[in-house]
Image (cartoon, helix red, strand yellow):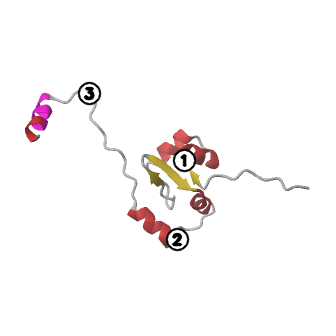
Amino acid sequence: MADIVSPQLPQLLDLRALGAYLGRPWRTLERQLLTPPPGFPSPVRFGRLLFWPRAQIDAWLHGVPPTLKQTEESAAMPVPLAPKRARGRPRKSERARNENSE
C-alpha cells in the first residue's frame, strides 16, 4: 500500500497564510502585529513583502524562547513602518520651501 503524501506547508508564511495557520483573520492579525506580542518572531522581508518562518511560529506557539541567533537577527533587521504622508495638496509655504531647497 502506498503512503499518502500530505501536502507540505510552506516554510515561509505570508500574512494571509499566517492568519490561516493561526486561525485568525489576516486583517485582525495585521492590526495586532503593529505591536506584536512578546517573543513573537520578526518577519523576513523580501522587498515590500513580509514572511514569517513557520519553524519560529511553531516554536512561539509552543512557548519555546527564541534562540540567541533569532533575537540577534530580529534586532539587526527591524521592520520600519512606512512614513505617513500628509493628505491633500501641500501648502504654499511648504511648496516654496521645497522649491528653494532644490
Q: Please say whether residue 101 is one of the residues in the magenta stretch.
A: no
Q: Quadrant of the N terminus?
A: bottom right
Q: Residues within 10 Å of mark 3 (few under 14, many from 20)?
A: few
Spot occupied by residue 59 in the image (x, y as percentages of width and height): 60, 63
Q: Look at label 3 and name its amino acid.
A: Gly
Q: Nearer the viewer, mark 3 or mark 1?
A: 1
Reading the chain from its start, which is encountered first: label 3 or label 1?
Answer: 1
- Write the start and end of the magenta stretch as one range: 92-98
The one nearer the camera, 35 or 47, is 47
What residue is disc 2 on? 67
- Against 78, is 85 above or below? above
Q: Which mark is residue 14?
A: 1
Reading the chain from its start, which is encountered first: label 2 or label 3?
Answer: 2
Q: Secondary structure at mark 1?
A: loop
What residue is disc 3 on? 88
Q: Look at label 2 and name its amino acid.
A: Thr
Q: Look at label 1 and name its amino acid.
A: Asp
| Residue at (62% x, 52% y) in the render | 10
The reply, left or right, for residue 102 in relation to residue 68 is left
The reply, left or right, for residue 30 in relation to residue 94 is right
- Against 41, is 30 above or below? above
